[in-house]
Image (tube, helix red, strand yellow):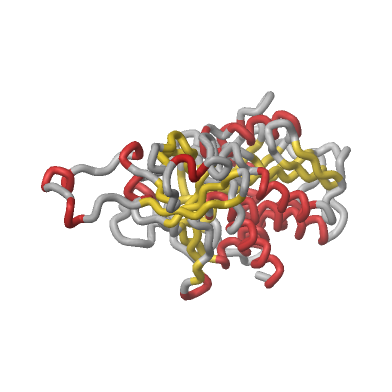
Amino acid sequence: MKDSARDFLFHLLGTPSPSGYEWPVQALVRSYLGPVADTVSTDSHGNVIGVKNPGAPLRMLLAGHCDQIGLIVQYIDADGYCSVQPIGGWDPMQLIGSRVVVWGAAGPVPGVIARKPIHLLTEEERKVVPKMKDLWIDVGARDKADLDGVIRIGDCVTVELRVQPLRNNLVASPAMDDKVGLWVVLEAFRRAVEAGPLACALHVASTVQEEIGLRGAQTSAFGVDPHVAIAVDVTHATDCPTIDKKSEGEISLGKGPVVFRGPNMNPHVVDRLFATAQAKSIPFQLSASGRATPTDANVLQTTRAGVATALVSIPNRYMHSAVETVSLDDLDHAAELLAGFIRGLEPGIDWSPGAPRAC
């Protein structure tokens, strides 16, 4: 991965984008796409869509969601402590002891989430798993009046956004889900465009509000009306303690992106991904889903009269936590795989399901 590409990834990871509050990161996306795409637009939902070679008869869409899970300020008590609701799926235990940031109109406000010290917990309290309503944010306010003009109801909150490099080209950070997928589709778009003329109209969408119902992919895909689409998200890495590979599959960091098979995926698109990976010696892993996946691929597949859809995922340890961990090598290989897939497209492909080639 080039230094400039890594810097852009880290910039994405350091920019807040809870579902419904994605505009700071979308500004980065527009700046990135500007020099590469023929057109860049933002729809009323907040999706950013770049297009290269518009008007070509075959329309291809890459989709990665830019939103992350977060919190929203629900209540400020007389002492200035903030209660919150979740945006997306949180395990409250992941939040206890976290450094957080409230993104107020006047600027970011650092805070912490904690609970009563263990010394002061009763025996009954020690047995109870805290719920979201039992947590609060302490920003150091003297009282509620101290927060006038600083924090108000409806402000979004993230855990502290920072990137922690680990050994063997691994990195940990909040919001790997799905800023790594967003990085992959943007980088694949750039690589495919810079390699020469395209045989398709190539669209790339930075979709919003995936974490609360796949909403941005639904609206952006309706607008693009693609023939073929690939969503890029994260999937659970199972190469760590306590995860059952029999139920979750065998997925490791550093062994390549994950190509899914199952009813949510068009077999011809999957076959072409296999062929691209094999032709370019790109490592990849396989995973199976017997139902519609909880990703943008779900709604891409059922847009309008139906779209030939595939799902490529980045292995992610500790999903929906402040320490989501991925391999930068997997990101690079995923971008190379998608760029190669795009470069291999030609007009007149029949995407209707039939007997796919042997894998």
Measuring from the top left, give residue 190's x and y in whole percent. Answer: 76, 57
Left or right position of 52 against 10: right
Residue 281 vs residue 78, the one in the foreground? 78
Quarter holding the N terminus? bottom right
Location of residue 70 with respect to 215 vertically, above or below: below
* Residue at 47% over, 72% down: 166
Measuring from the top left, give residue 30's x and y in whole percent. Answer: 76, 49
Left or right position of 308 against 86: right
Q: How many marks?
A: 0
* Residue at 45% over, 34% down: 74
Residue 270 vs residue 12, the one in the foreground? 12
Measuring from the top left, give residue 235's x and y in whole percent. Answer: 48, 50
Res. 75 in view:
yes
Q: Residue furthest top?
A: 305
Left or right position of 124 against 276: left
Left or right position of 312 against 27: left
* Residue 335 location, quadrant: bottom right
